[in-house]
Image (spheres, rainbow, N blue to C red):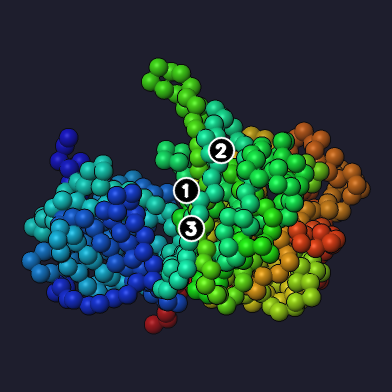
């Protein structure tokens, strides 16, 4: 190995040096960035700044930064260490064609504290969320890719060389820094218990996608209480195959179904298929989800629903082969672990599923070879009012889980009151289906019974050679958002599909609404004119909203909706960097 692979040359030596101090700083969030907890990150933020604490199992240097795809170049990076009572910290960037760290024009990291203790280095520092430095990535509510590393030795101050960290002391992770889950300071409250709900010894198919449904009876298993936390419990080694899990509750009133397992779409009874009152939802990349203090979903006891259905989506697109070239059977006992308390809570929460209907009759269509194709679902004011039933107390949205598949690139939850759009409830412009973590809103959002909610999804199909249709598998697409809110309403889902009542063929003929789905299904050439006709139809056609509840009769209502004429879209505050006039 040549010298340049063993060391990195820092262009411009380390410009920030500070005496070590001993502050006591409290961080709201903590996350281990590696499985062995050798690298633990704490952080906190306000409207303008973010503070970090890195606790790393080394007495050498610590690397940290932000990257587009988890690689060292191009990236926005920081390198720091402790030496002879001083903390050294440098603000750098790398270019697309080089791993050499270049000194940023502006040194924007501010040292707060640093020390070495018991073989561990602790660095604390802060930065503005948006620095206006070309070498810095802005920190927003979007998903961000962190890169990290650490070495066994300090860099050489005399020549600027940083010893290579090696293959095992580096990594990357996706994270949402500004809307991340947080454990309440009072967690766990008194009288807190956990119970696993698992799919025992299921054999994952060799390839493809499948949905498994397992029925449980929590009414007889646990006393009346409230769900305050849930997390995935995945069989070790199967993390790449368990894609998504949902826990629903409903009154099946059939004891013979308890502990039964079905393929959800083709084998499950209709009563199991229609059980859709969500109480927990997890997707790949998420960790645990804690409800805020004094908030939880009612579960258990004699007044609870008779049944819970755990739905697990397995996704496996390549056979697992043993050393002899023989396909391996992969047994799985994954599921969710739920944590509940029997202590009183102040706010009973609910989950509302928003997004596009997934049904063969109302197929979502996304053309191939598109860098940015947008699809929008609507929960209309009349559907919202129906969902609130007799309790018109506003909802307080406290968290959102965004859901898409392989070609989803951005998801936004929009919020209208009358013809004026309010600030977006949440947005992720860098969405990844490998990181669908819950987003805990920093400030609860008030939702009135006559508001309009929309889920806007953008898709990138530039690598696909045929259309993508709506569906759960990763070769299909979904556009969903689960809103966690309180107080709970008898309101499970509010989904929609386009009526295509303003669809035209490329020769200018208007397609009748009742024939639109068949017409689109028979299109064989999705050329530019046909793609434009689809775009026009989606933008100008009415949307059909369907709102539903497992606890009401009738159990659903359907509405037809267009945004009011003259509606004013929300415009984000300008955060661009402007050079002041001299």
Query: Which quarter of the rendered picture does the N terminus lie within?
Result: top left
Upstream in sequence: badge 3 or badge 2? 3
Of residues 247 and 209, the one drawn nearer to the viewer in this rendering? 247
Q: Is residue 171 above or below residue 447?
A: above
Left or right: residue 360 versus residue 218 is right
Residue that appears at 22% across and 65% down: 122
Residue that appears at 39% across and 49% down: 70
Upstream in sequence: badge 3 or badge 1? 3
Is the residue marked by circle 3 packed among few (<14), some (14-19), or many (20+) residues within 10 Å? few
Query: Which quarter of the rendered picture does the C terminus lie within?
Result: bottom left
Residue 413 in sight: no
Is the residue marked by circle 2 packed among few (<14), some (14-19), or many (20+) residues within 10 Å? many
Residue that appears at 76% across and 68% down: 387
Q: CA distance from mark 3 to mark 1?
A: 12 Å
Of residues 134 and 176, the one drawn nearer to the viewer in this rendering? 176
In front: label 3 or label 1 = 3
Identify the element where label 3 is drawn.
strand
Of residues 515 and 343, the one drawn nearer to the viewer in this rendering? 343
Upstream in sequence: badge 1 or badge 2? 1
Q: CA distance from mark 3 to mark 2?
A: 27 Å
Which x, y percent locates residue 381? Answer: 78, 70
Identify the element where label 2 is drawn.
strand
Residue on which disc 2 sits: 315
Of residues 191 and 104, the one drawn nearer to the viewer in this rendering? 191
Left or right: residue 544 versus residue 68 is right
Residue on which disc 3 sits: 194
Identify the element where label 1 is drawn.
strand
Residue on which disc 1 sits: 233
Q: CA distance from mark 1 to mark 2?
A: 17 Å
Q: Answer whether labels 1 and 2 touch (C-beta < 8 Å).
A: no
């Amino acid at each position: 190995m040549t010298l340049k692979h063993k060391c990195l040359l820092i262009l411009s030596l380390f410009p920030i040096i500070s005496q070590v101090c001993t502050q006591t700083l409290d961080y709201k969030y903590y996350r281990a960035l590696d499985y062995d907890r050798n690298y633990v990150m704490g952080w906190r933020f306000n409207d303008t700044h973010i503070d970090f604490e890195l606790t790393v199992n080394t007495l050498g240097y610590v690397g940290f930064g932000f990257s587009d795809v988890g690689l060292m170049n191009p990236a926005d990076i920081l390198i720091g260490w402790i030496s002879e009572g001083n903390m050294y910290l440098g603000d750098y960037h790398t270019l697309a064609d080089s791993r050499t760290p270049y000194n940023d024009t502006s040194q924007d990291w501010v040292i707060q504290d640093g020390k070495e203790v018991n073989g561990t280095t602790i660095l604390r520092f802060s930065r503005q969320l948006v620095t206006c430095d070309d070498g810095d990535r802005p920190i927003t509510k979007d998903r961000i890719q962190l890169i990290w590393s650490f070495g066994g030795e300090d860099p050489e101050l005399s020549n600027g060389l940083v010893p290579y960290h090696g293959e095992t002391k580096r990594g990357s992770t996706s994270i949402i820094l500004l809307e991340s889950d947080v454990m309440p300071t009072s967690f766990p409250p008194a009288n807190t218990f956990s119970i696993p709900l698992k799919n025992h010894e299921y054999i994952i198919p060799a390839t493809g996608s499948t949905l498994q449904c397992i029925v449980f009876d929590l009414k007889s298993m646990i006393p009346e209480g409230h769900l305050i936390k849930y997390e995935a419990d995945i069989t070790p080694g199967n993390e790449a195959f368990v894609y998504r899990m949902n826990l629903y509750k409903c009154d099946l009133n059939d004891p013979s179904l308890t502990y039964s397992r079905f393929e959800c779409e083709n084998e499950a009874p209709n009563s199991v298929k229609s059980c859709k009152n969500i109480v927990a939802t997890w997707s790949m990349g998420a960790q645990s989800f804690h409800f805020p203090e004094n908030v939880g979903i009612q579960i258990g006891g004699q007044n609870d629903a008779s049944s819970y259905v755990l739905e697990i989506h397995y996704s496996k697109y390549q056979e697992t082969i043993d050393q002899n070239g023989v396909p391996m059977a992969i047994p799985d006992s994954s599921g969710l672990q739920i944590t509940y308390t029997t202590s009183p809570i102040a706010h009973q929460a609910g989950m509302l599923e928003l997004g596009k209907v997934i049904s063969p009759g109302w197929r979502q269509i996304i053309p191939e070879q598109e860098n940015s194709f947008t699809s929008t679902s609507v929960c209309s004011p009349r559907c919202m009012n129906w969902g609130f039933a007799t309790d018109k107390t506003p909802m307080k949205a406290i968290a959102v889980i965004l859901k898409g598949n392989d070609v989803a690139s951005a998801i936004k939850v929009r919020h209208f009151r009358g013809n004026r759009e309010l600030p977006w409830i949440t947005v992720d412009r860098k969405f990844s289906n490998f990181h669908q973590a819950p987003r805990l809103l920093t400030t609860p959002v008030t939702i009135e019974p006559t508001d309009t909610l929309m889920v806007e999804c953008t898709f990138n199909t530039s690598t696909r050679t045929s259309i993508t249709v709506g569906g759960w598998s990763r070769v299909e697409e979904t556009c969903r958002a689960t809103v966690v809110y309180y107080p709970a309403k008898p309101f499970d889902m509010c989904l929609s599909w386009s009526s295509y009542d303003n669809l035209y063929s490329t020769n200018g003929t208007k397609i009748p609404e009742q024939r639109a789905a068949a017409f689109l299904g028979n299109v064989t050439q999705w050329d530019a004119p046909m793609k434009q006709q689809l775009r026009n139809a989606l933008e100008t056609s009415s949307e059909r909203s369907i709102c539903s509840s497992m606890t009401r009769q009738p159990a659903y209502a359907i509405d037809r909706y267009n945004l009011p004429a003259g509606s004013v879209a929300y415009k984000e505050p300008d955060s661009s960097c402007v050079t002041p006039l001299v």
